[in-house]
């Protein structure tokens, strides 16, 4: 009995962990196996990352290069490094500061119209009525129309002073038709662009509104709150994050509005509808000065990044505040 008791393992020995040397070898083996699996993933990702890097960096690097060089297609023999002269010529261009003002006016006006119009349409189409699905499709439709086609429709079928629908309605009411694109060019461009972006705001805000708990509205109605108070104290705070997303996305895209201006007013009369995008186009492809146009492109990239930085911070702050609640 004594020999059996001496050879049997103790409970502590049977449940003991393996030695530290075995642990280290096993850890190294697992780590090595993980690195072997991770390495092919990196190799598979490399072509896509390299292509994306070249796609973004090469055009930007070429733009920066041309912005510091004299390069006019009308004088290809006159080239060379000129430092910041292209930026100086751009800042001294009489159309530069009006283009910045027009860009800010266009973005601010379209944002205001699209956010307010999209919110009201979202509240309206959130109510049940017959044919709501078809009506929603009709409202969303303008967002899928190409900018050039939309500009042509508004220019020739709606705002034309002779054949347009507005001219026909004004003549029918005994009024003198208005040449909208000549007398109110910036307002006309704002209307056209807003017509395209209201459906986007409507779609985002309607999706957010459908996540609102109906019990909150019913409780407010039982407490005697009317539709206006429910809208301002329940619906609008609920749409706060969605409105921030709409503002951020639309601002980034509205910085590059071009087709509507090119098709309708060509930046005129004068510089009344020339934004920064159209100014860069006119300098590069109408005046054939690639150097100054590249300087304008770099300025546009810097401006877009500054705006995006503040918009992303605003969105992050909004989301953080909503999560804390």
Image (cartoon, grey):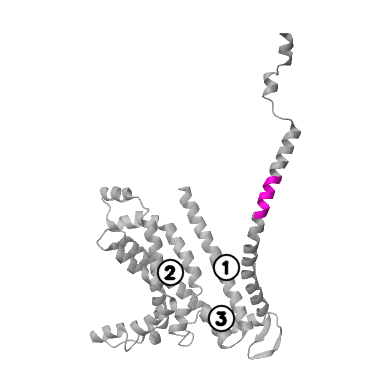
SS category of the residue bearing label 1: helix
Please tell me which residue lies in front, 116 or 9: 9
Magenta highlight: main SS = helix
Which quarter of the picture shows residue 184? bottom left
**Can residue 35 be seen at all in this image of the molecule?**
yes
At 69% from the left and 42% from the top, the residue drawn is: 30
How far separated are the C-alphas under marks 2 and 1? 18 Å
Q: Nearer the viewer, mark 3 or mark 2?
A: 3
Residue of label 3: 280
In the rendered structure, find residue 111 and report the number of the disc placed on it: 2
Q: Report the residue that reaches farthest toward the top.
A: 1
Q: Quadrant of the N terminus?
A: top right
Say if 70 sits above or below 124 in the image. below
SS category of the residue bearing label 2: helix
Q: Is residue 16 left or right of residue 208?
A: right
At 69% from the left and 18% from the top, the residue drawn is: 10
At 36% from the left and 85% from the top, the residue drawn is: 156
In the rendered structure, find residue 305 and report the number of the disc placed on it: 1
Please tell me which residue lies in front, 1 or 312: 1
Q: Earlier in the sequence, mark 3 or mark 1?
A: 3
């Amino acid at each position: 009995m004594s020999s059996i008791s001496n050879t049997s393992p103790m409970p502590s020995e049977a449940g003991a962990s393996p030695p530290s040397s075995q642990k280290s070898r096993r850890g190294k083996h697992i780590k090595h196996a993980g690195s072997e699996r991770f390495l092919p993933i990196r190799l598979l990702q490399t072509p896509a990352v390299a292509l994306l890097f070249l796609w973004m960096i090469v055009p930007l690097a070429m733009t920066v290069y041309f912005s510091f060089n004299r390069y006019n297609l009308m004088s290809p023999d006159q080239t060379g490094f000129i430092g910041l002269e292209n930026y100086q010529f751009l800042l001294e261009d009489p159309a530069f500061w009006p283009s910045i003002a027009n860009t800010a006016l266009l973005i601010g006006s379209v944002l205001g119209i699209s956010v307010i119009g999209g919110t009201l349409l979202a509240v309206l189409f959130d109510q049940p009525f017959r044919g709501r699905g078809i009506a929603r499709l009709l409202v969303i439709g303008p967002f899928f129309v190409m900018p050039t086609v939309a500009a042509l429709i508004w220019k020739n079928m709606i705002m034309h002073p002779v054949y347009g629908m507005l001219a026909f309605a004004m003549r029918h009411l005994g009024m003198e038709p208005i040449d909208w694109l000549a007398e109110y060019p910036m307002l006309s461009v704002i209307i056209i662009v807003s017509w395209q972006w209201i459906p986007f705001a409507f779609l985002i805000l309607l999706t957010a509104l459908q996540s609102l708990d109906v019990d909150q509205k019913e409780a407010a109605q039982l407490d005697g709150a009317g539709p206006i108070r429910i809208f301002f104290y329940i619906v609008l705070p609920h749409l706060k994050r969605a409105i921030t997303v709409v503002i951020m996305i639309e601002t980034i895209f509205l910085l590059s509005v071009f087709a509507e201006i090119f098709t309708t007013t060509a930046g005129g009369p004068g510089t009344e509808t020339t934004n920064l995008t159209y100014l860069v186009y006119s300098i590069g492809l109408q005046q054939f000065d690639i150097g100054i146009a590249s300087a304008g492109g770099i300025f546009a990239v810097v401006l877009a990044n500054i705006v995006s930085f503040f918009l992303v911070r605003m969105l992050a702050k909004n989301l953080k505040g909503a999560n804390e609640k």
